[in-house]
Image (spheres, rainbow, N blue to C red):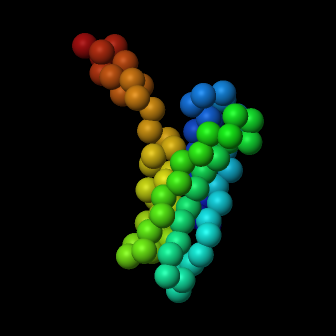
Amino acid sequence: MNNTMLLPCPCCGGSPTMLHKGNDMTKKRSASIHCGMCYLKVEVVAIRNNLDWCFKTVEAKWNKRIGIDQKQSNESE
């Protein structure tokens, strides 16, 4: 697993945990991030892409926050 900077859970503010199943040699691989407090989970499964792609994709999905970029752009105007 790579060292990632994960934001707190968007629902409860809990600490996220990243897990993976499989590796680049298995037919199917997945990476998931879940919150231990409210059990929110984001998962990416791949057959053709490698495990590093799964990590990057699931991290981007978990860290995406709707409205934060919009607020920052509105404040700068």
In the rendered image, the vertical position of residue 41 relative to residue 12, given as above or below = below
Question: Does 56 sit above or below residue 65?
Answer: below
Q: Which residue lies furthest to the bottom in this view?
A: 25
Q: In which quarter of the image is residue 9?
A: top right
Front residue of 38/17: it is: 38
Kindly indicate the quadrant of the structure image that contains residue 48.
Answer: bottom left
Determine the residue positioned at 56% across, 61% down: 31
State how many labels appear. 0
Q: Visible in this render: residue 5?
A: no
| Residue at image location 58% in from the left, 39% down from the top | 7
- The location of residue 56, given as percent across then percent down, is 46, 59
Residue depicted at x 51% and y 61%: 55
Above or below, 43 relative to 45? above
* In this picture, residue 68 sits left or right of residue 35: left
Q: Residue 20 appears at what percent x and percent y?
A: 62, 65
Quadrant for the C terminus in the image: top left
Q: Where is residue 41 in the image (x, y as percent from the top left)?
A: 59, 45
Say whether residue 59 is visible.
yes
* Residue lying at 53% horizontally and 72% vertically, measured from the top left: 29
Look at the picture and state if 55 lies above or below 40: below
